[in-house]
Amino acid sequence: MIWNKEYECMDRDNLRDLQLTRLKEVVRRVYERLPFYGKKFSENHLHPDALKSLEDLKKFPLTRKSELREGYPFGLFTAPLEKIVEFHISSGTTGKPVVNGYTRKDIQVWSEVMARALACAGTTSKDVVHNAYGYGLFTGGLGIHYGAQLIGAKTIPISGGQTRRQIMIMQDFKSTVLTCTPSYALHIAEVAEEIGVDPRKLSLRVGILGAEPWSENMRKEIEVQLGIDALDIYGLTEIIGPGVAQECEAKEGMHIFEDHFLPEVIDPKTGKVLEEGEEGELVLTTLTREGTSLVRYRTGDITRINYQPCDCGRTIARINKIKGRVDDMLIIRGVNIFPSQIENVLLQIEEAEPHYQLILERKRGLDELTVELEVSPNTFFDEVKRVEKIEAKIEKEIEDALGLRVGVRLVESRTIERSMGKAKRIIDKRKSK
């Protein structure tokens, strides 16, 4: 289902003309209303009038999250405070949060792009959307909520937690669309089994899952355990929240709603714009936001972009599943890896459960990585040789796939703490040394 064919299937030349018109307005708005942009442009000898084409955008400076934090609380607003009707803040845990302000028009834009995202997953007014993303200052819950209501779907604003109660409501309300993090979707399946409910016999048919990087093998695991199609959604508070991009049922990348968000992919080290298909850091410019407008914002997310039309009929660009974050990349003895790469290996191991953590420590002056992994309940820990054999097998699988020797420590089922939101995969003990 395509929610807005006019824009999602627009001729590429017409789309570029629309993007340029909107981009010129945004560049002028931030230049005139945000002093830090005015300063950045001047330092680079730039003026909004220098933007003559979309290609000219690469001349303008990139924007970092650290710069946005300096605007706390209301210094990032590109609309008068009296026009702001809603606040949201980033979910980061370090430093001051980034505050995003929404005007009434912004809420309408957010509802529109989220309706498109839900429609990508086949959502209609006949569906019951079980919305287990967090409500409140985090954007996940309300973003889904606005889009579902615009479509006319029946929305259950249940948020996270109280998993047994969630399962009861899924059964009683016949929920058909599940929206939450991938790790929480697995937790729902796990708890359902514990209480004697077959998760595959729920009415769910599709999951719209995001807010954390997850691998293709994690997708397969979720689909097997819940009996659903698991689709990826992408967004970030600094831009609008969820609804920046969404995977359709073809599962060939997430459609980015380019009439509202202009994407680039750059080399994270040099800032150079990369060609289509090259992997790098995603950079986004808002084209229609009023409350908080951003030009060339560095998301920190690693992906690649594809401008070829999709089999679903949409002509807008697609981005690959997020591989990881620039700041989550681990460099262990000269090897660059992302947690999602390790996850892909682990979920191919028969004895492994989809719950793990990566423990980083410094021993004898060197960084060491240990994968702590839950195994299936039928693994007997009193059989030491069998446990050691499984650990050695997993170590070899990781080394063969990634070229890195790591330690593996098996732990019993339900040992690793479950998350109602974003899973905490990396435990860095080096900082305490």
Image: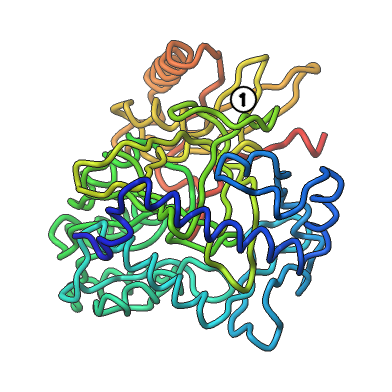
Percent across and percent down for residue 393 are 40, 15
Q: Is residue 75 left or right of residue 395?
A: right
Kindly tell me whether residue 379 is visible in this rendering: yes
Neighbour class for label 1 at 10 Å: few (<14), some, many (≥20)?
A: many
- Which residue is at 37% across, 42% downward? 318
Percent across and percent down for residue 97 are 72, 63
Q: Is residue 29 left or right of residue 311?
A: right
Which is more toward the observer, 167 or 37? 37
Q: Is residue 388 above or below residue 219?
A: above
- Which residue is at 57% across, 62% downward? 237
Which is more toward the observer, 10 or 405? 10
Which is more toward the observer, 421 or 385? 421
Task: Identify the image quadrant of residue 205.
Answer: bottom left
Which quadrant of the figure contains the N terminus? bottom left
For the residue labelled by badge 1, is the local secondary structure a helix, a strand or a loop?
A: strand
Task: Identify the image quadrant of residue 35.
Answer: bottom right
Amino acid bearing label 1: Leu
Which quadrant of the figure contains the C terminus? top right
Percent across and percent down for residue 334 are 67, 14
- Which residue is at 58% across, 44% downward? 283
Which is more toward the observer, 195 or 244? 244
Q: Is residue 94 above or below residue 43?
A: below
Which residue position is annotated with label 1? 369
Q: Is residue 7 above or below residue 162?
A: above
Residue with the most extreme bottom position = 82
Percent across and percent down for residue 269 are 69, 28
Task: Identify the image quadrant of residue 294.
Answer: bottom right
